[in-house]
Image (cartoon, rainbow, N blue to C red):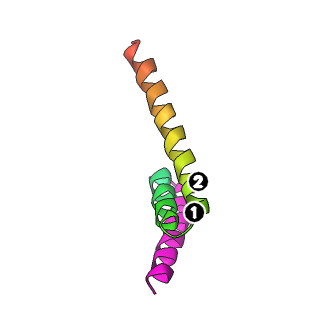
Amino acid sequence: MKKVIMNLAAALCFVLGLVFAVVPGPSVIFFLIGLTLLAVHYPGARKYLRYCQSTLSKGCQLLDRKLAKR
């Protein structure tokens, strides 16, 4: 029962992420929340979550370096 509820919550977050990708909103946040909920039960989702975390971290570091030069 708990797994079903988490999967439904993850699906809802992904749908909200898709909606917010079209209209202004926090789409990345909802995608990451949905992926985090899926990563609790599915090892394949953990791989994608790690990839997203490292990519976002590298992007933030690059942005920090660019802004520090100003």
**What residue is at 51 percent from the left and 57 percent from the top?**
31
Answer whether residue 24 is visible to the viewer in this image. no
| Label 2 Cα crowd, 10 Å radius (few <14 / some 14-19 / many 20+) | few
Distance Cα–Cα, label 2 vs label 1: 7 Å
Circle 1 SS class: helix
**What residue is at 54 percent from the left and 64 percent from the top?**
14
Query: Could you say where residue 52 lies in the image, as x and y percent from the top left?
Result: 54, 46
Residue 7 is one of the magenta-drawn residues:
yes
Name the residue tied to disc 1: 43
**What residue is at 52 percent from the left and 75 percent from the top?**
7
Name the residue tied to disc 2: 47
Asked whether the residues under the numbered discs 2 and 1 touch, taking CB atoms below 8 Å apart as contact, a structural biologist would say: yes
Query: Could you say where residue 28 lies in the image, as x and y percent from the top left?
Result: 49, 51
Answer whether residue 34 is visible to the viewer in this image. yes
Circle 2 SS class: helix
Q: Callout 1, which amino acid?
A: Pro
Q: Callout 2, which amino acid?
A: Lys
Q: Is residue 42 left or right of residue 70?
A: right
Residue farthest to the right, as pictured:
44
> Is 42 placed above or below 69 here?
below
Q: Quadrant of residue 65?
A: top left
**What residue is at 48 percent from the left and 79 percent from the top?**
3
| Label 1 Cα crowd, 10 Å radius (few <14 / some 14-19 / many 20+) | few
Choose between 17 and 47: the one closer to the eye: 47
Q: Which residues are magenta?
A: 1-23
Task: From the image, give the main secondary structure of the stretch colored magenta.
Answer: helix
Numbered disc total: 2
Query: Could you say where residue 63 lies in the image, as x and y percent from the top left?
Result: 45, 26
Choose between 51 and 20: the one closer to the eye: 51
